[in-house]
Image (cartoon, grey):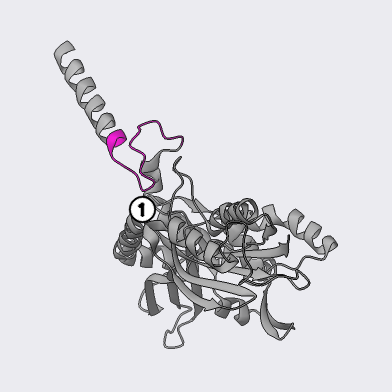
Amino acid sequence: MKTKFILCATMATLIVASCGSSENQSGSSSGEELVDVTEQQKPKLMVVPSDQLLNQFNMLKQENAQGKTLLIRDYNGYLLADANSKFIISSIQDAFIKFGFPLNDFEQTLKSINDQDMIDEVDGIKKDAKTMLLTTARPDVILELDYNFRENMESRGVDKMLTYSIRAIDAFSNKVVAAIQEADYGKNTPVNSAEKLMADALDVQGANFTKQIGIYFNDIIDKGRTITVRVTIENGANLTMSDECLENDTYTDFLIDYVKKNAYKGAYTLTRNTETELYFTNVQIPTLNEDGTQFSAYDFARAMSKALNKGCGMKSKNRTQGLGDALISIKGM
């Protein structure tokens, strides 16, 4: 018995040592990460109703602001209007928890941002509901739900069926990484519960769906994730991007060199280069910080803004709101 105990303890030690010695994306080879990086290998998910679903319940409106069309999403109103919403979202969450994925709860996240939303309204700051939702929960992937639960008119009883689609979307780049959909699911079964039909469908479809998500996330752990970076000069700042910085570079050259040096593996595309704006797309950033926590566009913009202020002796502000769209405004000297 004593020999068996020593053998088991030795094997456990070797396993732990092996896990701790593997290098993470940030290049750390230490086994002393503040966050268990093995848990970070599965993306954090959150179920979110699609715009089509919101529109079905009249909870999606359009508003014009400065020549742009904004979508106004009323998530709280949707939860009240759709009697099945909480149950079907809960069944999806339960299914993915069984598959071992960490999840943010949609309804609880909405509750947590209500107070801040009220403060922002008082201060006159208008924020998109979806942006606030994602920046509060910071999921890696959103599960965008659209469904229709209706009676089977061909049935003699009160049988019902479910038409649904779930799209796994990278919360940073809005790229669709996996999708499942079925029409009239449960048509020939006696099940009349939307959440039970959804759970049954994921029992069949979930394994392949989660496999696709896992493959995608492992890929961005290795290669980094994609964001956009926009730097603008505010009106009245009395300077241009072609003016000289303190290091005898123009502001344009300083900013391009910064992105080139700090983008993950140097990957980026300069899409727009004018006297008042630089716009970079396909900027690759690390998925994780050195301590295993999530790295976002805000983190990239914060460091970039500090470097700009110090290197060029100017005042700039990080105005990033979304997870994948960095925005820096230059206020002047």
Can you give x and y, in whole percent of width and height, for residue 120 in the image? 78, 60
Residue corresponding to mark 1: 99
The secondary structure making up most of the magenta span is loop
Query: Which segment did they paint magenta?
Result: 19-34
Q: Secondary structure at mark 1?
A: loop
| Pick the front one: 332 or 227 | 332
Q: Would residue 43 be visible to someone looking at this image?
A: yes
Can you give x and y, in whole percent of width and height, for residue 185 in the image? 38, 76
| Pick the front one: 34 or 146 | 34
Quadrant position of the N terminus in the picture:
top left
From the viewer's perspective, tell me whether residue 130 is left or right of residue 18. right
| Pick the front one: 186 or 47 | 47
Amino acid marked by disc 1: Phe
The reply to whether the magenta stretch includes residue 25 is yes
Can you give x and y, in whole percent of width and height, for residue 280 in the image? 50, 71
Extreme-right residue of the structure: 122
Displayed quadrant of residue 245: bottom right
The reply to whether the magenta stretch includes residue 181 is no
Extreme-bottom residue of the structure: 154
| Above or below, comparing residue 286 to residue 47 in the picture | above
Please tell me how crowded label 1 is: few (under 14), some (14-19), or many (20+) other residues with Cα within 10 Å: few
Can you give x and y, in whole percent of width and height, for residue 215 in the image? 30, 60
Quadrant position of the C terminus in the picture:
bottom right
Residue at the spot 61% in from the left edge and 76% down from the top edge: 54
Extreme-top residue of the structure: 2
Residue at the spot 71% in from the left edge and 86% down from the top edge: 67
| Above or below, comparing residue 15 to residue 274 in the picture | above
Extreme-left residue of the structure: 3
Q: Would residue 84 be visible to someone looking at this image?
A: no
Residue at the spot 49% in from the left edge and 70% down from the top edge: 144
Displayed quadrant of residue 205: bottom left
